Image (cartoon, rainbow, N blue to C red):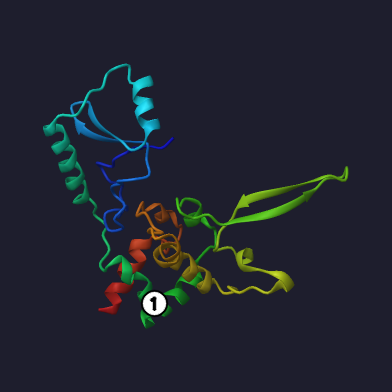
């Protein structure tokens, strides 16, 4: 069951409005919007959401009035203006920036300082890389374990015979960026980046999606 809460105070570094992910219209059971005065407008997406209200709201809900629905609309519109970080170019053109001379030069320099810690992928809500280990026991049994991994790890692209098709750090960094702004979108028709800004956790400051592409867009000008 998916219950969501509309953002009304964006976190520092978040750029969800630029990624067009600051609001949601489908895919939830219940979405709540704080309209002030301890009131929330609840939109029911699917029947489990309505069932939640019936079972746990103790009757403290009613049909929203027109002025309350208007407040919800205004709250969403005002929130979109609060994001201090925005893309300086369209989302669709971000991938092209990595192919420019500035983009290629940035990847080389970023590779020199990248710690390959994987922090940016660990906190990203759309990263799904994993690895599988066989763990044998002394009694002759064993266990196959699936663990979170990262496309930034050297071994992430290793295959049979020891070949690594992304052996250079700049290739792995580029792959991670393209995954967010191109690959996921091409395959699933949704943005691979939700604009949460969590990738700002990078210890050397090279992973925040908006900061990276805004810098490249500035150099391109």
Q: Quadrant of the C terminus?
A: bottom left
| Residue drawn at x 54%, y 58% as measured from the top left | 117
Residue 101 position, x and y percent, is 38, 83
Residue at the farthest bottom position: 101
Residue 22 position, x and y percent, is 29, 49
Residue at the farthest top position: 58
Mark 1, Cα crowd under 10 Å, few <14 / some 14-19 / many 20+, is many
Q: Nearer the viewer, residue 112 or 74?
A: 74
Relative to 115, is 202 on the left or the right?
left
Residue at label 1?
Answer: 103
Relative to 10, is 117 on the left or the right?
right
Looking at the picture, does residue 16 appear above or below residue 39?
Answer: below
The image quarter in which residue 211 lies:
bottom left
The residue tagged with tag 1: helix, strand or loop?
A: helix
Q: Nearer the viewer, residue 70 or 123?
A: 70
Residue at the farthest front position: 47
| Residue drawn at x 36%, y 51% as measured from the top left | 196
Residue 135 position, x and y percent, is 76, 49
| Residue drawn at x 24%, y 52% as measured from the top left | 83
Residue 58 position, x and y percent, is 32, 16
Q: Nearer the viewer, residue 39 or 162?
A: 39
């Amino acid at each position: 069951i998916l219950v969501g809460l509309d953002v009304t105070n964006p976190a520092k570094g978040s750029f969800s409005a630029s990624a067009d992910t600051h609001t949601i219209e489908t895919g939830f059971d219940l979405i709540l919007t704080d309209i002030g005065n301890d009131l929330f407008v609840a939109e029911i997406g699917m029947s489990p959401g309505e069932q939640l209200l019936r079972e746990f709201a103790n009757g403290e809900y009613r049909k929203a009035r027109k002025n309350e629905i208007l407040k919800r609309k205004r709250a969403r519109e005002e929130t979109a203006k609060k994001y201090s970080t925005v893309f300086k170019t369209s989302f669709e053109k971000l991938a092209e920036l990595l192919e420019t001379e500035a983009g290629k030069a940035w990847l080389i320099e970023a590779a020199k300082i990248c710690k390959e810690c994987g922090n940016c992928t660990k906190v990203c809500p759309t990263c799904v890389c994993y690895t599988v280990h066989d763990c044998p026991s002394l009694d002759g049994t064993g266990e196959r374990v699936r663990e979170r991994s990262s496309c930034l790890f050297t071994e992430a692209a290793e295959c049979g015979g020891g070949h690594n098709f992304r052996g250079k750090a700049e290739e792995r960094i580029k792959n991670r960026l393209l995954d967010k702004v191109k690959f996921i979108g091409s395959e699933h028709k949704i943005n691979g980046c939700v604009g949460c800004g969590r990738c700002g956790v990078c210890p050397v400051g090279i992973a925040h999606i908006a900061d990276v592409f805004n810098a490249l867009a500035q150099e391109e000008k």
